[in-house]
Image: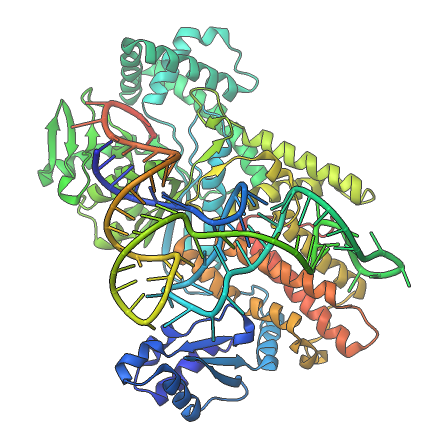
Amino acid sequence: MIDFKNEISKAIEKVINIDSKTLNTYIEVPKDFENGDYAFPCFKLAKELKKSPQIIAGEIQEKIELDKKNIEKIEVVGGYINFYINKETIAKEVIDEISSNENYGHSNVGKNKNIVIDYSSPNIAKPFHIGHLKTTVIGGALYNIYKYLGYNVIGVNHLGDYGTQFGKLIEGYKLFGNEYDLTENPIDKLADIYKRINELCSEDEKVLENCREDFKLLEHGDEYCTKLWKKFNDLSIGEFQKIYDLLGSKFDFWLGESFYADKTDEVIKILENTGKLQESEGAKIVDLSSSGIDTPCIIYKSNESTIYATRDLAAILYRARTYDFDKCIYVTSYEQNLHFRQIFEVAKLLGLDEKYTNGLEHVAYGMVRLPSGKMSTRQGNFVKIEDLLNDTIKEAKKIIEDKNPNLEDKENVAKIVGIGAVIFNNLATSRIKDEIFDIDAMLNFQGETGPYLQYTYVRTKSVIEKVSSIPKIEDINIEVLTDKYSQNIIKLIYKFEDILNQVIDKNEPSILSRYLIDLAKAYSLFYNENKIIVDDENIKNARVFLTYAVGKVLKIGCNLLGINMPNKM
RNA sequence: GUGCUCAUAGCUCAGUAGGAUAGAGCAAUCGCCUCCUAAGCGAUAGACAGGGGUUCGAAUCCCUUUGGGCACACCA
């Protein structure tokens, strides 16, 4: 499609002696379309050119040569030059592109680039609670969007299947495993064991020592410990898969921490050779104070077992070699901020190419808290994802019974809507913000929510169904789409690809979520103001096509976020 | 204490690499289905934590105060 902004900066370049790339960064989009589609503020140039912004603007306006077909009008207001895109041209551009491109917004900017995304990564034997929702859906959305932009994406579920927590579980199982029947709801039972052993540990340092010892045994291949560990794993993964099936989460690899157990020796060896590995209080550490990190990174514990940092470093080595990544992003809560700063710093000592160490990125998100306080598996204070999804699905079912009782396939639609509500809720705001979990907000399907997007989509489908076919592009009279409601929609559709680029630029799916809300709102307004199916073929064809275009972008966008779209609801 | 981070309307949030009058949604009150799904649309009302600084221009950048959150060596 035509890059209008670029057209403008190239035209300005010819008038003043500044290269168009710089000018491109000056051009902005006014908040209000009344002030044009693009604006060039002349204030920056005032000092340089020793003229007032108004005069500069006037001079540029006078001398600039623009293709009327692209920019139909320019106006000087204050120190701004406002540019108005030719309404018919942009409408035609969008309609041509929508009708010719099944994958609207798709691109190849990521061609030949490998992106590893480490996400979801729940801990074995712990309940899958709403604290894990963000990493799962943010990672999933980023996965889809990178892929849509042509990147080669490798999604890894870095399961927490190793470490002292397993020592604790093993020790707990030894002590009171016989009280539990693990054939039903195994994770709940394991979580209970975990809770109890933690209580013991905080009372008695000796118990904690035993746990650490159990993990050491596991790490050194002890048969009993390994057998138990495998059992816990199998039970847990089965439970996780149920949730992933509901959420539609997929991974290219399930490689938990244990996968790197035999790869940590090399990390230790490399670090030893750098001379940066020091003894401290019996442990082996890398001091990072010269990099401005006060806390040293522990590589090898004093009881001669590894720690998660060691395994994460081994994973970096492995991923660099196996996937040759350009970027490796970790989607976890900001709790782990220090940890990632540490290992990214230590990774520089592993002798890897800078490409890899520069490509490491921690994509952090805010904490989810319950109204009753911080969630804690140890203390048994959490909401399970499964329970939440069941609640929202139930609510969706209730609303369907109320509003559309004759709907076909109600169960399935309720599922799509209920789950969509949860996914959208987790992607709707900047990821860094903390969230106090609010079940009432989650169950409210009004306003800026997943169901609103789905509902708007369903309306577009309904219109299309009524007219039975999508109008041919040659039957569309562009003039019909020059009114403000249509133009609003067209301009939004026009910038879809740009939105996707912004998302990966910041690893921020909420940019897409917000955009889809804007699009749905613009369509709802259009829908409310206009009768779409009218006798006048001219008007009908254009409006129906616009409806089709909105539906298409809503569906592509929502699917990228991991939200399914019902045809009716 | 040190580091990171957040602070915008009663509540939940937008605010695009500082730009033209700070936008939504929820909740509340009131309107709109003889018409393509009212899970919708419209109206009313309300805000940049305090103080400095940089700049032609600051919600946005810097400093500082206050208040939340998180982390700070053998958990992940």
Q: Quadrant of residue A15?
A: bottom left
On screen, residue A237 versus residue A343, left or right, reads right
What residue do we see at 65% from left, 41% from top?
Answer: A444
Residue A294, placed above or below residue A374: below
In the image, residue A511 lies at what x, y percent? 48, 55
User: Looking at the rendering, which quadrant does residue A55 occupy?
Assistant: bottom left
- Work out whether A278 lies above or below A247: above
Q: Residue furthest left?
A: A275
Residue A24, image quadrant: bottom left
Residue sticking out furthest to the bottom: A63
In this picture, residue B37 sits left or right of residue A167: right
Camera-side residue of A423 and A315? A423
Q: Is residue A354 above or below residue A531?
A: above
Q: Position of residue A127 (x, y in %)?
A: 49, 26
Report the residue at 27% width, 79% height from top: A47
Residue A346 image point, x, y percent: 20, 41
Q: How many marks?
A: 0
Q: Is residue A325 visible?
A: no
| Type of colouring | rainbow
Image coordinates for residue A544, horizontal then vertical, percent = 73, 69
Residue A326 visible in the current orientation: yes
Q: Is residue A155 left or right of residue A249?
A: left
Residue situated in front as seen by the camera: A166 or A399: A399
